[in-house]
Image: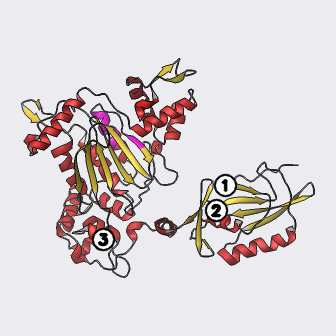
């Protein structure tokens, strides 16, 4: 059989025959990035031919128009006496349904969209975000004036709000931020940012913090931070300073200094990002504090086309919640040009700590960063802890003095498995498969070698990795 040269396209599909079932595929491709489909051609690009092509040339475009309202290019070709059909599907800028159902092509699978996934898809196609949705019951009276004042004070201090707005009414602030719908209803963003009780409207407006020692079953203390998200970072940092992170004392020219063990500005940038870009229809933000590193996870994967590696370079800003991001920008919390992770890198490098690791895991984004000076902490009791809490934390601090840097268990296991499959695997390939940055892979490999989990045999170019630890150690 002779072969064809398919058109260059992100998605190309080959089908040996036509079936009406493939109308779902056309719907899914139109809702995604478009595609070119060939009928009468097998997966090896070989033309196997179609029967009744004259009828199909009439039926296929008519069915697509009648069921989905789409106009597509349908072309007939002939090769060595065999006829085949090409259907060119352009991506649609509005949601497309087939028999009342919405389909979406993701990777190599065709998915039917339902529930929250369908809501997000429709909003995205309409150029809107979840925080645009109006609330039918809340009014301006449900907003906290202290939260509004906090926003105005920070925005004026950052030079992003004019001083004349210092006493602006709540109504005016909400109008200026575009948080009213055309018919005067409050958007979700207004309630997340400023409501007296956001949990009245959203169940997952929480920031959970846990202090762990050996594994996730060994929880020492925990806190749940609630309330509006405009003030949430301040509340989280206050709790972290009081219970979870240390502030070693030193003196500079007779002046007492107590800097946080990690760069506070960079920490705040990580917190602002996790809060502003969270998927608020999902789980709460979760922070796990270990002996020598910290993990922060928020639900909501990175925008399409943006990778953890790309975050560390210059990139366009892609806010999941554009209204929340705008309010955070006005308050001086974040930048609008995708420079947040550059600030994080600079902050950690300035105190001799490695750049945090960014991973896409479990439907969200996890940032892991190393702690510093965990063995030289100030007294937690002096910061207002109870005797019981002080004893727990003191025991943990003694443990940290004899531990080395840990890597996250799941990433370590993934790297071990990938090395087992291919000892010659490169750092770049590991980064792609683990969905973390190359810098993150380098850090993980270094720590794994320090823990005698693996070793490098031979040079960087031409060498290979060798596993030198029992697999049971990971269980």
Q: Are marks 1 and 2 in contact (CB under 8 Å)?
A: yes
| Residue beneath the point at 36% across and 49% down | 297
Horizontal side of 281 relative to 462 (left or right) equals left
Q: Nearer the viewer, residue 360 or 315?
A: 360
User: Disc 1 or 3, which lies upstream in sequence?
Assistant: 1
Q: Position of residue 327 (x, y in %)?
A: 31, 62
Residue bearing mark 1: 11
Number of marks: 3
Whole-Å distance between the Cαs marked 2 and 3? Answer: 35 Å
Quarter of the image for residue 15 reads bottom right
Q: Position of residue 429 (x, y in %)?
A: 54, 35
Mark 3 crowdedness (10 Å alpha carbons): few <14, some 14-19, many ≥20: some
Residue bearing mark 2: 29
Horizontal side of 418 relative to 270 (left or right) equals right
Local secondary structure at mark 3: loop
Local secondary structure at mark 1: loop
Residue bearing mark 3: 201
| Residue beneath the point at 82% across and 70% down | 56
Q: Is residue 141 above or below residue 78?
A: below
Q: Mark 2 or 3, which is nearer the eye?
A: 3
Quarter of the image for residue 275 reads bottom left
Res 184 visible: yes
Q: Are marks 2 and 3 in contact (CB under 8 Å)?
A: no
Whole-Å distance between the Cαs marked 1 and 2? Answer: 8 Å
Quarter of the image for residue 318 reads bottom left
Q: Which residues are magenta?
A: 343-358
User: Disc 2 or 3, which lies upstream in sequence?
Assistant: 2
Residue found farthest to the right? 81
Is residue 5 part of the magenta span, yes or no?
Answer: no
């Amino acid at each position: 059989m002779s072969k064809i040269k398919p058109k260059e396209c992100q998605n190309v599909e080959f089908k040996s025959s036509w079936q009406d079932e493939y109308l779902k595929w056309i719907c899914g491709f139109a809702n995604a990035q478009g595609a070119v489909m060939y009928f009468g051609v097998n997966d090896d690009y070989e033309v196997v031919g179609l029967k009744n092509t004259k009828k199909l040339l009439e039926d296929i475009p008519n069915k697509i128009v009648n069921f989905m309202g789409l106009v597509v290019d349908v072309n007939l070709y002939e090769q060595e006496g065999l006829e085949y059909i090409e259907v060119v599907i352009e991506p649609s800028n509005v949601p497309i349904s087939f028999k009342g159902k919405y389909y979406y092509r993701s990777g190599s699978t065709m998915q039917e969209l339902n529930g929250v996934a369908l809501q997000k898809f429709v909003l995205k196609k309409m150029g809107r975000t979840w925080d645009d949705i109006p609330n039918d019951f809340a009014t301006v009276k449900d907003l906290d004036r202290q939260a509004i004042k906090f926003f105005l004070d920070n925005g004026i201090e950052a030079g992003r709000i004019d001083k004349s707005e210092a006493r602006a009414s709540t109504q005016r602030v909400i109008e200026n931020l575009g948080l009213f719908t055309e018919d005067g209803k409050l958007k979700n963003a207004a309630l997340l940012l400023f409501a007296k009780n956001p949990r009245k409207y959203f169940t997952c407006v929480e920031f959970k913090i846990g202090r762990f020692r050996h594994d996730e079953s060994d929880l020492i203390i925990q806190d749940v931070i609630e309330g509006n998200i405009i003030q949430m970072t301040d509340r989280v940092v206050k709790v972290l300073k009081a219970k979870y992170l240390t502030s070693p004392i030193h003196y500079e020219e007779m002046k007492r200094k107590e800097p946080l063990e990690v760069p506070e500005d960079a920490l705040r940038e990580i917190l602002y990002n996790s809060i502003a870009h969270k998927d608020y229809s999902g789980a709460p933000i979760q922070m796990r504090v270990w002996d020598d590193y910290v993990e922060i996870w928020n639900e909501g994967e990175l925008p399409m086309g943006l990778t953890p590696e790309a975050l560390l370079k210059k990139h366009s800003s892609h806010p999941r919640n554009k209204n929340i991001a705008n309010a955070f920008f006005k308050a001086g919390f974040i930048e609008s040009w995708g420079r947040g992770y550059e600030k994080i890198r600079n902050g950690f490098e300035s105190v001799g700590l490695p750049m945090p690791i960014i991973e896409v895991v479990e439907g969200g984004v996890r940032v892991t960063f190393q702690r510093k000076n965990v063995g030289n902490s100030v007294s937690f009791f002096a910061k207002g802890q109870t005797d019981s809490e002080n004893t727990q934390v003191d025991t943990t601090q003694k443990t940290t003095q004899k531990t080395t840097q840990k890597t996250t268990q799941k990433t370590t296991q993934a790297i071990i498995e990938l090395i087992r499959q291919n000892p010659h695997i490169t750092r770049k390939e590991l980064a792609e498969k683990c969905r973390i940055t190359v810098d993150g892979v380098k850090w993980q490999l270094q720590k794994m070698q320090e823990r005698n989990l693996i070793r490098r045999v031979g040079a960087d170019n031409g060498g290979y990795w060798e596993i030198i630890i029992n697999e049971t150690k990971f269980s």
